Amino acid sequence: MATTTDNHTAAALEKESSVNTGAANPNGANAGNAAAGAPAYGYGYNPLLHQHSGPEPRLPAFGGEFQPGLWKGIEHRKFANPAPLGLCGFALTTFVLSLINLNTRDVTQPNIVLALAFGYGGLVQLLAGMWEMAVGNTFGATALSSYGGFWISYAILLTPGFNALNAYSSAADEGSALGFFLFGWFIFTTILLLCTLRSTVMFFLLFFTLDLAFLMLACADLAKSNGNASAGTTLQHAGGGFGILAAFLAWYNAFAGIADSSNSFFTIPVFHFPWSEKGRAARGKTEREIA
């Protein structure tokens, strides 16, 4: 009995110690409530490892959480961070389609993308967007749900059973319609891009390269519809190149959202803009240290 009592006492003391010291997983479900004593990895690294002080602390922008601006951590969050899941679904589907747009190993038919577009990039990313709503992230919910819808709609266009493109009487009309479709996504991505200007470099570059990919691919379809096959192919390859970059940047931001001290020996930099809240705070700290 004495041994059992001692074990219970030790466990209680250990629990009390962890509460008092604020030990917490900096990237976990309660990352927004991590104590100020979390390990510091320096300016430009995972901002979930640092918390603003004050009566209502705000965390800096972070692509791993799909947060483009200051945000408040959710106390006792019931959901894990859904952003890396959505980012990975987007990244893999974009990666495969972009390889085909580059005619890698002479593969030109995008049919293999259908499975990913319906399943991973479509359904799974859409679900991640819905979960972003549950955790109160408007930007993440809008972006992930919309791009999940993009992949599902793109898969519908490529699926013969839907006959979505059969209504067009000529290849020129079909190319123009696809160009309109992609231009709409270019405009939408531009809106999201403008919302990342105060976030991090890696988060901004994700939407910047994706925006250029949509623009290049839209112009490629319009060029082909005008009978300029050579320009269309060049623009398609450019769109594929920007798509590859966007895919790897999505994986990069996903990794930043997953990796923490509990599962990785290091965290990766996300590079805050100098004019962002985190950048201004770091610059002010450096100036005070020099003074």
Image (cartoon, rainbow, N blue to C red):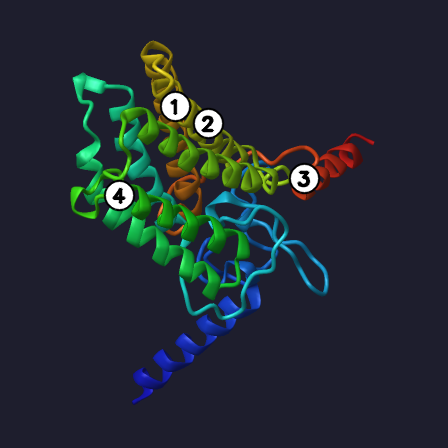
Of the 4 image quadrants, the one containing the N terminus is bottom left
Tell me which residue sits at (47%, 55%) in the image: 141
User: Residue under circle 4?
Assistant: 164
Three-letter residue code for mark 3? Ser
Query: How many residues crowd mark 4 within 10 Å: few (<14), some (14–19), many (20+)?
Result: few
Q: In terms of sequence position, does the residue under pointer 4 or pointer 3 come before the other?
A: 4
Q: CA distance from mark 1 to mark 3?
A: 30 Å
Q: CA distance from mark 2 to mark 4?
A: 22 Å
User: Residue under circle 3?
Assistant: 276
Q: Quadrant of residue 138?
A: bottom right
Pick the residue in front: 202 or 284.
202
User: Residue under circle 2?
Assistant: 215
Tell me which residue sits at (54%, 65%) in the image: 74
Q: Secondary structure at mark 2?
A: helix
What mark, if any, has residue 239 been given in the picture? 1
Q: CA distance from mark 1 to mark 4?
A: 23 Å
Pick the residue in front: 90 or 203.
90
Residue 277 visible to the viewer: yes
Q: Is residue 7 left or right of residue 70?
A: left
Q: CA distance from mark 4 to mark 3?
A: 44 Å
Q: Nearer the viewer, mark 1 or mark 3?
A: 1
Q: Nearer the viewer, mark 2 or mark 1?
A: 2
Task: Give the answer, above or below, for where 8 lies relative to 105.
Answer: below
Looking at the picture, how far across and down is residue 160, in whole percent?
Answer: 17, 42
Q: Nearer the viewer, mark 1 or mark 4?
A: 4
Of the 4 image quadrants, the one containing the C terminus is top right
Farthest top residue?
A: 230
Looking at the picture, how far across and down is residue 264, in whole percent?
Answer: 37, 44
